[in-house]
Amino acid sequence: MAKTIPVPSLSVDGWIITPTKKVDKLLCYYFLSEPSQSQLYTVISLPSEIAKKGNWPNQLKELVSNDLQTFFGSYFTEGVSVYVEVKDTDSSGGQISQYTIYCQVIVTIDGAKYSVAKMASVLNSQIVKLADA
């Protein structure tokens, strides 16, 4: 049996140990955290990557993929697979300013696979909508 690392939560759930809930909570943390939330630790998050490479979808996709692989790899040591897609939803043909980011994370725990997917709609470097995908 693999060592299970619980995920902290500031909700009534407390420490989360259920695999699907852990993946979902960690993905939400990545999508919603801000680097300014800590002065002691490096906070990796989607908003910080959008601030760095929000107008370059291929580079943003690579950054997000690497972030998720690293972030989830520290919680799930058996295996992590990440799928990220950035779709341009701006029909004006100009520099990309409106797009959707799809992220799917599949983790392996004791040989079983658990998957969670989310999407974020981005407009002018701001996340305007977050939903399950």
Image: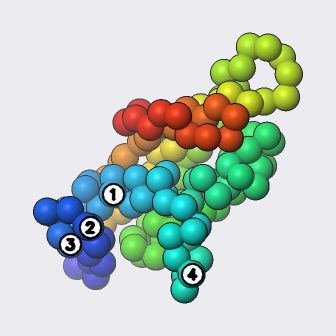
Which mark, by number, is residue 9? 2
Q: Position of residue 29 (x, y in %)?
A: 42, 59
Vertical arrangement, residue 73 with respect to residue 131, above or below? below
The N terminus lies in which quarter of the figure?
Answer: bottom left
- Residue that badge 3 annotates: 15
Q: Which residue appears farthest toward the left when viewing the image?
A: 12
Few, some or many C-alpha atoms within 10 Å of disc 3 (few <14, some 14-19, many ≥20)?
some
Q: Amino acid at mark 1?
A: Lys
- Residue 102 seen in this snapshot: no
Q: Amino acid at mark 4?
A: Gln
Query: Mark 2 or 3 closer to N-term?
Result: 2
Query: Mark 2 or 4 closer to N-term?
Result: 2
Query: Mark 4 or 3 closer to N-term?
Result: 3
Residues 38 and 113: in front is 38
Q: Amino acid at mark 2?
A: Ser
Q: Amino acid at mark 3?
A: Trp
